[in-house]
């Protein structure tokens, strides 16, 4: 929705400002989530302070014009402030009765703590006196002023909050008090003078006294916060577009720090950890909103408000129920109580754990609020990964060093780090860490991403650390009062226990326990809990595509089947060759100089392969198992050239060239030198290996069908499918297809057995996509190997690219996503689309799937659905994600 108005110069310009009653909950893209929520609550007649919203379009225009206000915005803000003055009957900057406002960010989706907010804007040396006189509360006025100076200086002037917090801590020590509410008016007034001196020292200017300048700088700072490092890191982690911008809400201030009949709180209409239908949240008496969210003080439970102010609690509870019924989803609410009067400051869809998301969806269907299809579309598919968190091994014996709030579920063990930057640096060295902080701030988000878990001394279940960790699926224990953190010396004391940077610690975000040692963790069980099985059964009713799994062992196959896999889309045979009891035989086969010698070695490998295939086929009885014939180059099964050069040189010097040990090593060195390639990824591998050494593929196919025939004789429904890797020409397809078919038919004839089977190919070369019609005249199925197809399309080596330039490409926005994580629709996807079209023109019943790890990434699953693929195949633990993503693709809620 976009309304147009004439600008001052007569040029038609967008409407950049909406008062709350002009907007609605459907305008999130324009007004941001916070603004749309305020508008919707205002329209519903709920107690909301007066205010207006500067649109996301204004933010985008601000950046487009080189970080300058777009034409007409400043004048519009001025007119809107005059209107706000008329509505509130107070004047902005009036020394006797000042209008004060908050300036808040708000993107279209919740980004908790990632962007900036400023409260109490409009205070200066004159208006603070007027506020004190009007409220007859000098302490409150000077407390509000010092808060404003701290927030404004941090957000706008870039001064670290620590510079002010140290002065507050010093003041409390001098007064002999523990908490901020115990500081008296005179002390706050003295601190304000010291704060202004800090501003002069650090910003080389006086703290601005002109309220118009304060407002303009604050709006600019909120716009700027859209592109802060923490906001960019958060968007990248959560796959949020950089092109949305943030809205800015300018809201009449209401105060929770006016005494014991005032306070502020954050609440959820249902428990965001478990999904239980209870009002869940926290409340601080005599405080402002940032005290709860920032974890500055450890708050009380929301139920405590029921005892202290029962009428306010009852009013709030009724509003919470009304908002949940209206939005038909759990809500995240912010509110303030000013002198016994309740004001609603925010409603937005609540962030929640995956478990809570599923259980809330199930309950809301039972309650009649939503139907099954809407429930399926509501849960973020990728968050299901959270349901398979690690837990502490029950066999471990340990003492709990301290206990905090169970803020985000799961267990994590790691070495202690005290800064976000160290968490990142240690991860790059391959170390697991737990980030330990007094409280986290939005600037710590990159460290939270890098760490295994987060532990904070302050804050509650709705603090920044808790909310962000839950969204990331990271274990978090918050509000652990027993922690005494010495940031300067990088130590933490828990009673008599003193831990330093690098010491191991284990946290349990499910119980809140903290253990001062490294404990063994156990992965979550593979079986689905009943509530998740029910939810996924609703998804299964909806989806078009099947979900298969990639599995190389019977154990993986059974796990995949338990999680709902409908087949095996990729069984990699090379992993079977790497086992220690087989590797010497594989090396014997590679070192063989004649086909006869090679056949002798392969005959020894045959029983191993037959046993491998029998186990997987039996585990998947009644379902298809797609077995890819040997794919990698042969030198991968031999020691490295460098290692052999060193070993042969040492043996020659030590014992001469006539010893049996030297001769074996020397023969292996010569063979490795023969097999050495400048670019083995594009050398003698995939189907080229099977064409030059047909006996290898013949042995594998024979093993597959001997295993399947033996199972059939036992009454087990084995369904093998043979996949030829890396075919790029029709001639390669014909040669390998005919050889595989002969080996399969010979094995079945020898066992007097008949099986339905198919021979197909993995599509992993651009040329294969372009000649797919030629291949489909022979191949009976296609499976896209998108890992290699991405490598060969981009010309990237995955192992090298992801370790070197891809991170830089993402930072510089040369790439929007890592193409090995999220399928590249424009390039790789276009090739896939061509292959599907040509393949089905040549063979109408051609079965087509995908077996790269993209098969478990939700947006890639949606693209596969749009191509009309029969199935996606992914690792076993991603099967539930793919099941839900496939359903959401069918519903159109995922694209």
Image (cartoon, grey):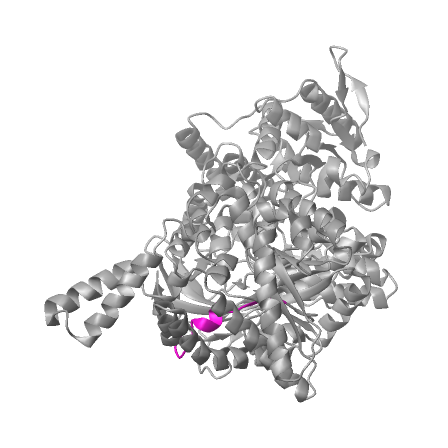
Q: Position of residue 825 (x, y in %)?
A: 64, 44
Outermost residue toward the bottom?
714
- In the picture shown, does residue 748 fall above or below 696? below
In the displayed structure image, the side of residue 725 where residue 840 appears, left or right: right
Q: Position of residue 398 (x, y in %)?
A: 44, 80
In the displayed structure image, the side of residue 777 where residue 210 appears, left or right: left
* Res. 85 image quadrant: top right
- The image quadrant where one finds the N terminus is top right
Which span of residues is magenta-colored? 569-582
Q: Is residue 830 magenta?
A: no
Q: Position of residue 266 (x, y in %)?
A: 67, 54
Res. 755 visible in picture: yes
Res. 295 visible in picture: no
Q: Nearer the viewer, residue 42 or 558?
A: 558
Q: Residue at x 32, y 58 (%)?
A: 674
Q: Residue at x 51, y 77 (%)?
A: 609
Tally the marks: 0
- In the picture shown, does residue 161 fall above or below 749? above
Q: Nearer the viewer, residue 500 or 415?
A: 415
């Amino acid at each position: 929705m976009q309304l147009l108005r004439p600008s001052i110069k007569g040029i038609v310009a967008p409407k950049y400002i909406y008062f709350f009653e002009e907007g609605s909950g459907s305008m999130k893209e324009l007004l941001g989530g916070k603004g749309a929520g305020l508008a919707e609550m205002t329209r519903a007649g709920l107690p909301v302070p007066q205010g207006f919203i500067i649109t996301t379009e204004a933010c985008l225009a601000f950046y487009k014009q080189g970080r300058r206000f777009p034409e007409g915005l400043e004048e519009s803000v001025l007119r809107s402030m005059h209107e706000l003055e008329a509505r509130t009957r107070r004047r902005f900057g009036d020394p006797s009765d000042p209008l004060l406002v908050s300036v808040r960010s708000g993107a279209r989706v919740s980004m908790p703590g990632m962007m900036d907010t400023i409260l109490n804007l409009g205070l200066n040396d004159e208006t603070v006196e007027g506020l004190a006189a009007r409220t007859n509360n000098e302490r409150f006025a000077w407390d509000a002023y010092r808060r404003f100076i701290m927030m404004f200086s941090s957000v706008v002037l870039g001064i670290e909050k620590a510079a002010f917090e140290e002065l507050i801590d010093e003041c409390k020590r001098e007064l002999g008090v523990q908490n901020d509410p115990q500081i008296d008016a005179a002390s706050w007034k003295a601190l304000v003078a010291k704060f202004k001196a800090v501003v002069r020292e650090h910003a080389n200017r006086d703290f601005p006294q002109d309220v118009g300048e304060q407002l303009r700088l604050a709006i600019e700072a909120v716009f700027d916060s859209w592109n802060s490092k923490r906001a960019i890191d958060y968007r990248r982690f959560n796959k949020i577009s950089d092109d949305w911008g943030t809205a800015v809400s300018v809201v009449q201030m209401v105060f929770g720090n006016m005494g014991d009949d005032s306070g502020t709180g954050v609440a959820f209409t249902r428990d965001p950890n478990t999904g239980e239908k209870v009002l869940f949240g926290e409340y601080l008496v005599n405080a402002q909103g940032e005290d709860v969210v920032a974890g500055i003080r450890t708050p009380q439970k929301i139920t405590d408000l029921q005892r202290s102010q029962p009428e306010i609690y009852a009013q709030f509870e009724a509003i919470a129920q009304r908002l949940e019924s209206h939005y038909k989803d759990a809500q995240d609410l912010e509110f303030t109580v000013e002198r016994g009067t309740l004001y609603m400051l925010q409603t937005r869809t609540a962030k929640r754990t995956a478990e809570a998301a599923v259980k809330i969806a199930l309950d809301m269907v039972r309650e009649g609020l939503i139907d099954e299809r809407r429930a399926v579309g509501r849960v973020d598919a990728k968050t299901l990964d959270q349901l398979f968190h690690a837990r502490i091994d029950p066999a471990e014996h340990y003492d709990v060093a301290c206990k905090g709030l169970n803020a985000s579920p799961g267990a994590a063990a790691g070495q202690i780090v005290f800064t976000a930057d160290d968490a990142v640096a240690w991860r790059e060295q391959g170390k697991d860490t737990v980030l330990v902080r007094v409280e986290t701030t939005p600037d710590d988000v990159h460290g939270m991403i890098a760490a295994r878990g987060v532990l904070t001394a302050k804050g509650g279940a709705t603090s920044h650390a808790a909310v962000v960790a839950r969204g990331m699926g990271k274990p978090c224990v918050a509000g652990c009062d027993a922690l005494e953190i010495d940031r300067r010396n990088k130590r933490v004391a828990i009673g008599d226990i003193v831990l330093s940077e690098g010491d191991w610690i284990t946290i349990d975000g499910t119980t809140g326990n903290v253990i001062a040692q490294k404990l063994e963790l156990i992965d979550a069980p593979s079986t689905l809990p009943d509530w998740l099985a029910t939810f996924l059964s609703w998804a299964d009713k909806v989806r078009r595509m099947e979900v298969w799994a990639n599995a190389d062992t019977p154990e993986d196959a059974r796990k995949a089947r338990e999680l709902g896999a409908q087949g095996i889309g990729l069984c990699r045979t090379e992993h079977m060759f790497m086992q220690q009891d087989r590797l010497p035989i594989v090396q014997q086969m590679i070192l063989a100089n004649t086909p006869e010698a090679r056949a002798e070695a392969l005959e020894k490998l045959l029983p191993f392969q037959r046993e491998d295939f029998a186990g997987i086929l039996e585990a998947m009885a009644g379902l298809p198992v797609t077995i890819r014939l040997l794919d990698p180059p042969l030198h991968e099964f031999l020691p490295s050239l460098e290692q052999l050069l060193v070993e042969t040189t040492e043996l020659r010097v030590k014992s001469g060239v006539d010893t049996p040990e030297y001769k074996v090593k020397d023969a292996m060195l010569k063979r490795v030198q023969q097999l050495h390639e400048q670019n083995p990824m594009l050398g003698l591998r995939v189907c080229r290996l099977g064409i030059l050494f047909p006996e290898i593929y013949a042995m594998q196919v024979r093993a597959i069908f001997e295993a399947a025939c033996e199972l059939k004789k036992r009454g087990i429904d084995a369904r093998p499918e043979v996949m030829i890797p890396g075919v790029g020409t029709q001639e390669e397809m014909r040669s390998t297809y005919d050889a595989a078919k002969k080996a399969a038919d010979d094995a079945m004839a020898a066992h007097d057995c008949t099986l339905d089977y198919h021979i197909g190919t993995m599509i992993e070369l651009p040329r294969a996509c372009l000649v797919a019609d030629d291949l489909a005249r022979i191949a009976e199925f296609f499976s896209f190997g998108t890992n290699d197809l991405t490598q060969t399309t981009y010309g990237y080596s995955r192992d090298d690219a992801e370790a070197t330039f891809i991170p830089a490409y993402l930072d510089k926005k040369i790439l929007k996503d890592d193409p090995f994580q999220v399928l590249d629709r424009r390039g790789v996807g276009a090739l896939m689309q061509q292959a599907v079209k040509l393949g089905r023109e040549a063979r109408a019943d051609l079965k087509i799937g995908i077996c790269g790890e993209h098969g478990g990434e939700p947006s890639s699953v949606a693209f596969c659905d749009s191509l009309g693929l029969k199935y996606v195949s992914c690792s076993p633990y991603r099967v539930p994600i793919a099941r839900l993503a496939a359903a959401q693709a069918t519903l159109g809620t995922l694209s």
